[in-house]
Image (spheres, grey):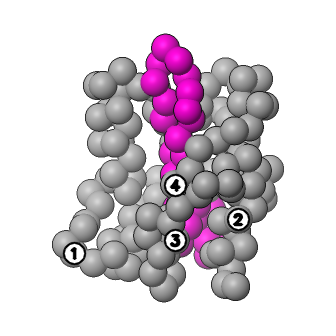
Amino acid sequence: MNNLNVIMGRIVKSMEAFRGSKPVINKEGILSVRSVCRDPEFEKYNSIKEYLTEKLVQNGFELANEDDILDMVAKINNLIGDSETYGDEFAFEGVKSGFEDIGCDCDYAIGKKGGVYIGISMWYEKVSKDPKFVEVMAI
């Protein structure tokens, strides 16, 4: 099992999202998993961003700064290839806006530990607040 799989497993488990998780991208150097967050602790946080940030910190990551994010985007584009180029913070701003346009709450957080970057996004329907979908990307 490689380092990204171990890191991904820890992050996903910390959100109680391991059961039913499915890889979206699984290439050398990049792993992205989608699932549903079942963490009852989520309700204690004021926002999606606060919750995701805390999960990164709990797992030993520091929050990425703008230069880190640009480096992460460049690495993603290099690993995925030109046909699926991400223009901003690996398209989370566009995805966030799209989900908000259809009545969902959505946010993301990006962390860094050593040479590893983690991006986590969460979205859910504003009224029911369930299910809480998450996508975690590690490079």
Residue 126: x, y in percent? 47, 19
Q: How far apart are marks 3 and 2 (CA)?
A: 11 Å
Give the crowd class for mark 1: few <14, some 14-19, many >=20 residues within 10 Å. few
Q: Residue 34's mark?
A: 4
Q: Do the residues labelled 4 and 2 touch (CB within 8 Å)?
A: no
- Location of the N terminus by quadrant is bottom right
* The quarter of the displayed image where residue 75 is located: bottom left
Relative to 66, residue 70 above or below: below
Q: Name the residue under label 1.
A: 82
Q: How far apart are marks 4 and 2 (CA)?
A: 12 Å
Residue at the image point whose x is 36% and y is 21% from the top: 103
Give the crowd class for mark 4: few <14, some 14-19, many >=20 residues within 10 Å. many
User: Which numbered disc, 4 or 3, marks the residue closer to the eye?
Assistant: 4
Q: Are marks 1 and 2 in contact (CB under 8 Å)?
A: no
Q: Is residue 110 visible?
A: no
- Per the rendered image, the range of residues in magenta is 112-139
Give the crowd class for mark 2: few <14, some 14-19, many >=20 residues within 10 Å. some
User: Which numbered disc, 1 or 2, marks the residue closer to the eye?
Assistant: 2
Assign a secondary structure to mark 3.
strand
Q: Distance between the residues labelled 1 and 2?
A: 28 Å
Disc on the earlier residue, 1 or 3: 3
Name which residue type carries label 3: Leu
Disc on the earlier residue, 1 or 2: 2
Q: Are marks 1 and 3 in contact (CB under 8 Å)?
A: no
Residue 51: x, y in percent? 68, 35
**Horizontal side of residue 106 vs 17, given as left or right:** left
Q: Mark 2 points at which residue?
A: 9
Q: Mark 3 points at which residue?
A: 31
